[in-house]
Image (tube, rainbow, N blue to C red):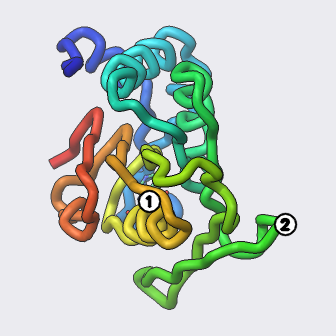
Amino acid sequence: MSTLNKIDKEIIENSIRNIPDFPKEGIIFKDITTLLNNPIALKTLMNHVEERYKSYNLDYVAGIDARGFIFGSILADRLNIGFVPIRKKGKLPFTTVAEKYSLEYGFDEVEVHIDAFPKENARVLLIDDLIATGGTAKAAASLITKVGANCVEACFILELDFLNGRDGIESDVYSVMHID
Ligand code: AMP
């Protein structure tokens, strides 16, 4: 199993920008656009994630709308497997299965195509940029199961440990970096 060495961790960590009070007061938004436009940081991150998952015998990577699409697509291509988008409600054109989840105020909904994982009993890695309360990832993982595939692990670039988001997720969880 690959571990992230101190230098690589610093390269990735230092490439992520903190935006205080976005999208509202009190939230420190972790801006990964500065990681994406830094080719060394992006390659360092993707090398690490590829190294971890190359022996998992995965069939698909499923990415959460929208930043999970970026890391998920790169990883799927590196692993020579398919990519599946898990989208916010109303964006997917074919028949979908949906899952609601609670937000601080109200709820949101994610969807996946009913035939998103054509391989029987597919082994799927779920990926997103960040796990906070875990609501989005829990709903996404449950969608993977609903359409007949197996969520083998959920992977995040950053985890906000103090929100305990991973506790609600049934699959294994791996986060490249943690904020406590
Ligand atoms: P949650 O459902 O609470 O785990 O929220 C996770 C989703 O919201 C992910 O898709 C993240 O991209 C986004 N998100 C939540 N908190 C932050 C934050 N502090 N910085 C950047 N993105 C965030």
Q: Position of residue 103 (x, y in %)?
A: 44, 80
Relative to 125, residue 17 above or below: above
Which quarter of the image is occupied by the N terminus?
top left
Residue at the extreme front = 120
**Vertical arrangement, residue 87 with respect to residue 129, above or below:** below
> Quadrant location of ligand 1?
bottom left
Question: Badge 2 is on which residue?
Answer: 93
Q: Position of residue 64 (x, y in %)?
A: 55, 54
Q: Residue at x 41, y 41 (%)?
A: 18
Q: Which mark is residue 138?
A: none
**Label 1: few (<14), some or many (≥20) within 10 Å?**
few
Residue under the image location 58 percent in, 30 percent down: 81
Where in the figure is residue 98, as x and y percent of width and height?
Answer: 60, 78
Residue underneath mark 1: 21
Q: Amino acid at mark 2?
A: Pro
Where disc 1 sits, the SS reads loop
Q: Considering the numbered disc 2 on the image, is that residue within a helix, a strand or a loop?
A: loop
